[in-house]
Structure formats: structure tokens, C-alpha cells
Amino acid sequence: MTSTVTVNPTAAKAAISGLTLRYLVLAGLIVLASVGFSLANENFYSLVNIGILLRSIAVLFLVSMGMTFVMLTGGIDLSVGSNVAFAGGVGVITLTTTGSAPLGFLTAILAGMAIGTINGIFIGRLKLSAFMVTLATFALARGLALVIYDATSINVSDPTFLWLGGTSWGNIPVVIPFVFCVFVALSVLLYRTPFGRNVYAAGANFNTAFVLGRRPERSVVWIYALSGALAGLSAIVTVGRVSSGQPWSGLYLEFDAITAVILGGTSLFGGRGRLLGTILGVLLYGIIINGLVLTGTNPYLQSLIKGMILLGVVLLDSWTQRGKAA
Amino acid sequence: MNNRIDMKGIGKSFFATRALDNVDFSSVAGEVHALVGLNGAGKSTLMKVLGGVIQRDQGVIELNGQPIEIAAPVDATKHGVAMIHQEYSLINELTVADNIFLGRELFIGGTPFLNKREMARRVRAQLDRFGLDLDPASPVRDLNSGEKQIVEIIRALMSDSWLIVMDEPTSALSEEDKERLFGFIRRMKAEGVAIIYISHHMPEIFGIAEQVTVMRDGKIVLSERTSNTTEAAVIKTMTGTELDDFVKPVKTISDDVLLDVRGLTHAHAYQDVSFDLRRGEILVLTGLRGCGAPELAKAIFGLTSGYEGTISYRGTTLRPGRGPAAAVRDGMGMVTENRDKNGIMAALSVRDNIALPFLEKATRGGLINAAKVEAVVAKAIRETSTKTSSPDQEIRFLSGGNKQKICFSRWLDEDLELLILLEPTRGIDVHAKADIYRIIEELATRGVGVLILSYEIDEVIMLADRVITLYQGRSVASYSHPDFDKDKMLADMAGANLPAAAHA
Ligand SMILES: Nc1ncnc2c1ncn2[C@@H]1O[C@H](COP(=O)(O)OP(=O)(O)OP(=O)(O)O)[C@@H](O)[C@H]1O
Ligand SMILES: [Mg+2]
């Protein structure tokens, strides 16, 4: 914990002279944190533990990448955690009723996308506040999940359905290369396609993007749909990991994702940030949380520490932002 | 007492850019000191140092011989320095009156309650002097750029400062408002106020300034009494080369009508306006603030609906409010009047800001062809001599004039057919202006129809093939090159020649 406090000045300088320096600082912190935790607990550095760590944050990777798209537009998606539960429910019910795993995958992703599209239409087309709309769907999707599951979890044993979240190749969980593939695909989408440029344009100045004929209102719908689809994907991974579908899965996921994205240098005001930063943010955040568990920190303190990390990062960003405004 | 302020040996760097290099600059009560130079020369940076908006790296600032510390805008205010910023510094969410009295609010008696009525009264009195029919209680967000500029000016005028810095105060003003501003400046000068005046318009400067200082690449290259120098000499020292003046080429324009506007009417903005624009023609609409031309342009670009009358483009009637995406697809481009609101994307790079409208064309198999984008961007930067450290630089770090150049250069594409320009050369220096006029002529020669709104009568006359004067949303008269009658045009704009109800 002390480490995050003492590095503030360094990180502040980093943001001023561009994202690259911030990534270097993040990478440095990741090394620092893992060395620190491995000194405190020799188990930390074991290959087994790294596998466990990566698997435990696989879902956070996926959701945070979607959140990065959303936050690049200056928006926020509070519904992702509930959406994971809802989409998982739809997938699991489809699986149990039809017995078809591919159909279960498909419906899970479509269900996640549906919630995302609803968000997108209200935010992009009807110009409502992203915070309010996704706060509503946050409650709505959780409610739907509870209804679908009838408030109890459902065990899943279909090996195909569990493969993505549950299988390991040696010490490497299958989901890790999968996350990497998603990262590459989303990077291509964000940096190499007109859609990706439109994401930045919509966030940097919606009016200008509109006048330049970039249809930001349409981009925003697709961006929230993407975030929802990634929540659906995360639902599949989550079910695979615990071999059951649970109505309360994905709790606080939106909090973790937002923190990781901001930690990764994406601006709260839109238009600025990269996927790589989010990956580093998730890693650092995951290591800190996981390390606290391994070193036997009082679990009640975890939430406190998470809150402090978020507050610290937001404070830091507003300082550097003010430095830039001059 | 005769106040004076002296800035000595001021230096400022932004990373590798040396924006100010050992600059000496003084301002004396009762005088107008003009500061000129190319876009990106460092004028605004110098004034931001004086206003406490940015911190200098080297140098001292002295008030009447005593060094003073200006670490924040509030220090500048304390020493009696007010600023009219080039980029509007008004708070959009507040009302006109709140903005003007921000930080100097009036209270009822000794109570902590705001005297809203008195503030509104005083603001209205000032607005009246500008002939601006505006409710002091309306939010600044809804104002157009000329109105914002006037509010910004009024705020400085009402601040009881002895030194007022005006960074391109006339860039969005119509001829009439400019004259009013000059009237204020002359009166304040007589009252012992010092004014630092930044502008790219030589006649303005030689009309009101006692002293003129030229900056180039962050250094002072000339400082002289205006009575001892000439416009040509000043323009020459800006670059070190003669001005390559724009001369309108002779050309014949086809009869191919590109845009046909018939009986266009919209509640308060414009009434029964008709004109056509042929391919290769440069048509300039001109008038005073409130003449309706910006609103007309927006209707043509598909931004507004709810008008009566028809707009046909390439022979087909456009659906009202069809949206800019359709307009861009059909080969239209537009430079808007409010650069910060809907012209630039501040957080994005120069590259993104230029390339966005082209992206689909630079795409192969769904992926952007980076080399192609790079070529387009490099060309746009080169042709308009935009000063940027690299295409990766965020556009918000560019000087005002250079931002404007990008708003223009992003449309220079082969498929362009109709270019709509609202105040295209706003804030652009004299040398680059000539370049932009040349580019516009080249476009026209290639067959692009160009529709321009300009408030600057000299620009109108220099650039237009045809001029339509507007008064309060009605077209007054139409003039064709070279039969331009400047005095008559000015009279048209002022409403003297109504009701001619002339149609093009
Ligand atoms: N915050 C900043 N960061 C980096 N570079 C900056 C920043 N502010 C200004 N510059 C650079 O400093 C130089 C001077 O800019 P400045 O705004 O003073 O020009 P200017 O003379 O006012 O030009 P214009 O006539 O276009 O308004 C430009 O090259 C600009 O890009
Ligand atoms: Mg400037």
C-alpha cells in the first residue's frame, strides 16, 4: 500500500509527458508489487499461483477492455457486473433446456449485447446520462438474473461449456491465451479501423464528430453493445471457472473495471487512453488484490483498500489534468 | 499616475518548443500597443504569461519599476490587468451577467445576497451600447461566436482595469461591431487605460495603435512607433520575406448549377432567400451579425430542419435535417464558425483531426491504410503551412490560427464538390491567408463550388466571384466580380438599401 502512495509524484510526471511514460511507471509498479508480495509470501511467485492469479482476473481483463471503449467516449458502464450474471443465466438456462453448449454461448453473448444495446440507445440516441442509464440497467440486469435463476445457483457439468473458463494447459489456463486474442482483436478494431477512430472522436468532442459526419450517436450504441457482448463472454468464463451459474456473480465487477481502466491512464473525460494501459492497470490491480489475499490481509480491509486506490488514482489524474490545462 | 508594465527577458518552453525567447515587452497607460506575428509566433503565450495563465521559465515583470509576482490569473486581476482571451474563457453554464460579474459580484447593501437586478441592469446597458439585443439572464452556451466575443469584451471593459489585453478581439466581429470596439478603445485610451492589442489586420493596427511590436518564432524582431513604419514593413518583418499577395486569377465559370436554394425561410433566422451556386464559383454571403448566413449554411449542410423552401444539390432536393454524415458522403465539407464547440477535437492528435472525414476512403479490407492517411495529413499541413511539432501533437497545443488552418485543410480532398466556409480565415495571419485564398481558387478552378460567409469586407471583395449581401435574414443585393461597390455593400449590410428584395 505504501508503494502506491510514494510513487504519486513520479506517476504525475508520467501523465504529463504522455501515456508511454505512464505505462513504464505501471510496468515498474507491477514488478515492484510482485517482488514485494513474493518477499512476503514465497508462494506468490510459484507458477501455480501465477496461473491462479491470471485466471482470477481473466474476467476483469475482458470487462475492462469493453469499459475502455466506453470510457474513451467519456461514458461509463455500471451495468457490466449485473450483466455478467444475467448473460450467464441466459446461457446456462439455454444449455440446460437445449443441451447445446454452442447455443448456450451464443445466447449468453447475445443477452449481454442486448443489455449493452439498450444502454447504447438511451445514451447515444436519446442523449441520456450514461451514469443514470447504466445505473438503471445495473439494477435491472441483476433483477433479471435473480428471476432467471430463481435466486439459486445452477450447477453446470457440460465439458464444452466449462472448457473456456475451467481448463488449463499445464499451469496456463486456456482463458489466458483467449484473453490475449481478444486483446489483439480489439486493438485492431480500436487503432486500425474507422470505427476505432470514431470512438476517440465521439469522446473528444461529440459535436465535432457529428459535424464531420462521423455519426457519433451510432458509434456510441455499438460501443455499449460491445461492452455488453464482452460481459456476455465474461459470463461464459465465469460459469466455466466455478462450474455453476450464480445469480450473484459479477458483484462489484464494474467497480474493479473502472478502477483498472483509470489506473491504466484512460481519461475520465474521454478521448484519451489505450487498451495497453488497461491491460497494465488490470494486472497491477489484480496483483495488489491477489497479493493482499495471499499475505493474509484481513478481508474486511480489501474493500477499504480498493476504495483508496480508486480515490488516489482519480486525485492523481485530476492533478495532472490541471497541469495540462495551463 | 501613469502606470506602465514592463516584461523583461521572458522565456518559456513547451518541451522542445521554445515559445518565448528572451522577450522584452512594455505597455504604457494611455497607449495602444499592437502585438503582431505569424500564427504560432508566441503572441498569446506572452500574454498568458502576463495574465498568470501560464508560468514563465525566465524573466521578470515590473509594474512601475517594481518587480511583481503573477503566479495566477487572480494576481493579474489584482494588479489591474484584464484579458480578452483568443479562445473564449466564458463559462457555458453561467448566464451572460454571471459571467461578466464573476469574481466581482454586487451585493444588496451589506448582505451576502447577490444584487441580481443591478448586475443585470448594468450588463444590459453595456449590451445596448453594442446594439446587442440579448437577455443578461440567458446562458452563454446559447450564444454564437460573435456574441460570445462581445460578452468577453464587455467583461474586460467593465472590470475597471488599467491594462486590457485583447487577443484577437475582432476575429468574430462584424464590421459594425468592430467600429464600436474601436470607439471604446479610443475613449479608454483618453481615460488613461493601456491596451495591448493582438491582431492580424494591419489596417486596424495602424488605425488605433501607437506602438507596434512584431514577434517571430518567440523573439521580438521589431518594435516601432506606428508613425515611423508602414504596413508593408511590418508584414515583411513577420517572415523576413515580402508578402506574396493574393491576386484573383481570371477564369470562366461553367453554367453547371451545383446548389440551388429557393425561397428558404426559417422563423427568425432567414426569410425567402434564393440563390444558386455553380460549379467552380466562389459565392460569398456577407452581412452583419444576425444576417442569417450561418443558419443558412447549416441548413444546406443538413444540420437543421424545419425550414420552408427547397435546397437542391446536384439536381436533387435535399431532405431537411438529413444530417452531416449524408452531406459529407455527398462531397460537402464545412468549416463551422465555432472552432472549439464543433470544429476541433481538443484531445486528439493533429492527424486524427485532419484525417477523420477521409477515413473511409483510406480504408482497405476494413483496415485503415496508415501510409495513405499520413500522406493526406502531411499534404494538408504543408499546404496551409500549419505550425505543429508533429502530426502526433494534440491539437489543443496549437496556436489559435493553426487550429483554424486544420479546420480548413481537413476538407481538401479530391471528391470535394461543395465547400461551405464560415469565416474561413478567422485568426489566420496575413501570409497564410494569402495561401488559403490561393487554395480556395484552386478548388474552384477544379470545379468545386465554394460558399463562404465572411464579415470582412476586404476579404469578400478580394475573394468572391459573386457576393450576396444580407440584412437580418433577407438577401439585399447581388454583385458579380469585378463590379463590387464597397460602399454600397456596406450600406446594404446596414439595412440602408431595403427593401430592394433583390433575388440572385
Ligand atoms: N501548452 C502548450 N504546449 C505545447 N506547445 C504550446 C502550448 N501552448 C503554445 N504552444 C506552442 O507555442 C507556440 C506559440 O503559440 P501561441 O499560441 O503563443 O501563438 P500565437 O502567436 O498566439 O499564434 P496565433 O496567431 O495563431 O494565435 C506554438 O508553436 C504553439 O504550438
Ligand atoms: Mg494566439
Image: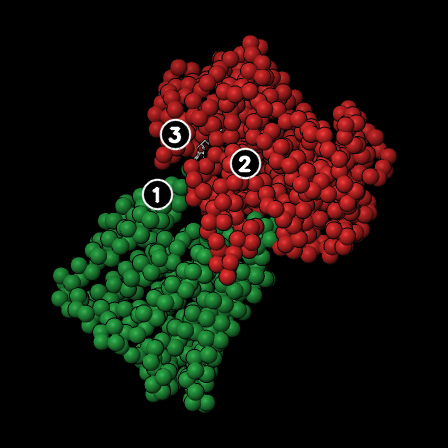
Q: Which residue is mark 1?
A: A17
Chain B, chosen colour in render: red
Q: Please give the name of the residue rendered at 22% of the width and 76% of the height, measured from the top-left corner.
A: A170
Q: Please give the name of the residue rendered at 38% of the width and 17% of the height, measured from the top-left corner.
A: B66
Q: Secondary structure at mark 1?
A: loop
Front residue of A240/A141: it is A240
Cα gap from disc 3 to disc 1, whole angstroms: 16 Å
Tell me where residue B149 appears, x and y as whole percent.
60, 34
| Amino acid on which the number 3 mark rests in the picture | Arg
- Tell me the quarter of the image containing the C terminus of chain A: top left
Asked whether the viewer can see residue A265, the reply is yes
User: Could you tell me which chain the residue with mark 3 belongs to?
Assistant: B
Q: Which residue is mark 3?
A: B18
Q: Please give the name of the residue rendered at 25% of the width and 51% of the height, measured from the top-left corner.
A: A5
Query: Counting other residues with Cα less than 10 Å from the Cα at mark 1, is it few (<14), some (14-19), or many (20 or more)?
Result: few
| Amino acid on which the number 1 mark rests in the picture | Ser
Do badges 1 and 2 share one subunit?
A: no
Single out the mark in the foreground, 3 or 2: 2
| Amino acid on which the number 2 mark rests in the picture | Glu
Query: Counting other residues with Cα less than 10 Å from the Cα at mark 3, is it few (<14), some (14-19), or many (20 or more)?
Result: some
Tell me where residue B245 appears, x and y as whole percent.
61, 24
Tell me where residue A287 appears, x and y as whole percent.
25, 63
Cα gap from disc 1 to disc 2, whole angstroms: 29 Å
Asked whether the viewer can see residue B87, the reply is no
Q: Is residue B253 above or below residue A112?
A: above
Q: Secondary structure at mark 3?
A: strand
Tell me where residue B25 appears, x and y as whole percent.
44, 19
Chain A, chosen colour in render: green
Q: Which residue is mark 2?
A: B383
